[in-house]
Image (cartoon, coloured by chain):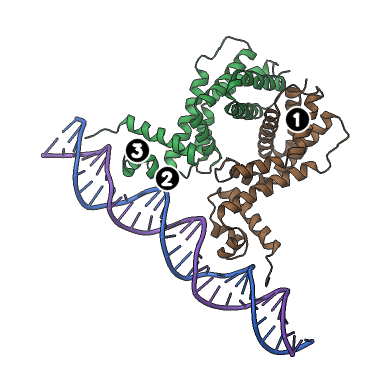
Chain colours: A brown, B green, C purple, D blue
DNA sequence: ATTAAATGAGCAAGCACTCACTCAAGATTC
DNA sequence: GAATCTTGAGTGAGTGCTTGCTCATTTAAT
């Protein structure tokens, strides 16, 4: 091993990919991503074998980041509502404070270049959160909906709330609370 | 005027665009769309000046179709809940019965090739529905949320419900009702 | 006969990806 | 510690392919 791959460069490529994919969509050229990262285009392909691999790894990185943020400070011992609200706040805060990441993730999620395997792996990062939801359901605190339904609703309401806050940042805390109220009244028994 | 443009051909192009954009995303080539419509590629450009214009018109056509479906049979005289449920059912049914249209619309909606003007015009098609929501809010039947928030939540919950039904079509009516319950309990006073 | 729709080969631009080459950073030898 | 060897990261012009769009020509409706 003569010269090790640089983790810093890998991260620079991913950071530039977030920026350009958020701004231009997945059609953002590899040449542009490499230039933005301060590297030659060829270098990008020593870190990622193909553009598809770059996009899939970026997708997983973003999903993992959101999941990690959510689990940090998760109140294991608290009641259902409080734990639920923690997840909600984490999702909304992450989306607002990582606007480019959120836009990029949205573009990636609707693309067919993200493999089924990546999608499954991306969901797996949220398995602890799913387990929490499942426990609450069995406790009878939540209505008896399938977990996929609750997860989809959580994601959908989060997205709508973030979109609204993005247009009217002054009301951030107000809409954050209002969004959670809709979720809670919609799902709780 | 020697030879009139054919409305049938225009619609064939739009129909093929729906099919291919749903399957491949907005990167679906104009050559493929024209071939699928049974026309030469050049003909496509006598009906639509550019690919961007085709995509924008397709976006508006789909939005208008969904709005028209929703307004058809709208119970003007009924109570808020019933009118609300009609809108919900129309959205969900349209999404399930027009799967390709929905996928195409989703791809178009996240694309930056849809102009701000098109987006505004697309929303305008739903102005009557917005007015209905506004009236219900003033009547005190709904919580006091801004209209944009209610609209976004409606769209988001619809999407989540459709996604779930697509995966488990046998439970269509059940999930349709469950989704509406979440919406209603979340928004009603 | 006139006019404009319809055609599809062709064009310029943009794309992902390659590869012959350079050179910096470990490994080996003394 | 210095000198030398070895490996593979880094480079960017080049390649082959695809794309949106054009235009000289053909076809058909009026």
Going from N to C along the chain, the mark reached first, 2 or 3, is 2
Q: Are marks 1 and 3 in contact (CB under 8 Å)?
A: no
Q: Which mark is residue A73?
A: none
Count residues near mark 3 (Cα–Cα under 10 Å), then give few for <14, some for 14-19, many for 20+. Answer: some
Around disc 1, counting alpha carbons within 10 Å, would you say few (fewer than 14), some (14 to 19), or many (20 or more)? many
Identify which residue, A26 or B97, lies in the foreground.
B97
Q: Residue lying furthest top in this view?
A: B77
Q: Is residue A88 left or right of residue B119?
A: right
Q: Quadrant of the C terminus of chain B?
A: top right
SS at mark 3?
helix
* Label 1: element kind: helix
- The residue sitting at 55% across, 57% down in the picture is A30
B6 or A52: nearer the viewer: A52
Query: Could you tell me which secondary element the residue under label 2 belongs to?
Result: loop
Residue B37 falls in which quadrant of the image?
top left
Disc marking residue A180: 1
**Residue under label 2:** B29
Q: Around disc 2, counting alpha carbons within 10 Å, would you say few (fewer than 14), some (14 to 19), or many (20 or more)?
A: some
Q: Residue furthest right?
A: A77
**x and y, in percent, of residue A111 in the image:** 56, 43
The residues bearing labels 1 and 3 have C-alpha atoms spaced at a distance of 47 Å
Distance from Cα at disc 2 to Cα at disc 3: 16 Å
For label 3, the residue is B47
Q: Nearer the viewer, mark 2 or mark 3?
A: 2
Residue D3's x, y, as percent?
70, 89
Residue under disc 2 on the same chain as residue under disc 1: no
In terms of depth relative to the viewer, which is nearer, A139 or A109? A139
Query: Label 2 vs label 1: CA separation?
Result: 42 Å
């Amino acid at each position: 091993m003569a010269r090790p791959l640089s983790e810093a460069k890998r991260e620079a490529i991913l950071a530039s990919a977030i920026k350009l994919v958020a701004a231009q969509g997945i059609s953002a050229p590899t040449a542009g991503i490499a230039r933005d990262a301060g590297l030659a285009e060829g270098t990008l392909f020593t870190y990622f074998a193909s553009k598809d691999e770059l996009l899939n790894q970026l997708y997983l990185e973003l999903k993992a980041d959101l999941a990690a943020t959510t689990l940090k400070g998760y109140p294991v011992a608290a009641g259902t509502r409080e734990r639920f609200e923690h997840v909600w706040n984490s999702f909304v805060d992450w989306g607002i404070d990582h606007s480019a990441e959120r836009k990029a993730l949205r573009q990636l999620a609707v693309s067919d270049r993200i493999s089924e395997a990546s999608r499954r792996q991306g969901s797996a990062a949220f398995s602890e959160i799913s387990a929490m939801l499942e426990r609450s359901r069995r406790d009878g605190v939540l209505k008896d909906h399938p977990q996929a339904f609750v997860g989809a609703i959580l994601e959908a309401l989060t997205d709508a709330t973030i979109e609204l806050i993005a247009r009217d940042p002054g009301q951030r805390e107000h809409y954050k609370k209002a969004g959670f109220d809709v979720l809670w009244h919609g799902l709780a028994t």
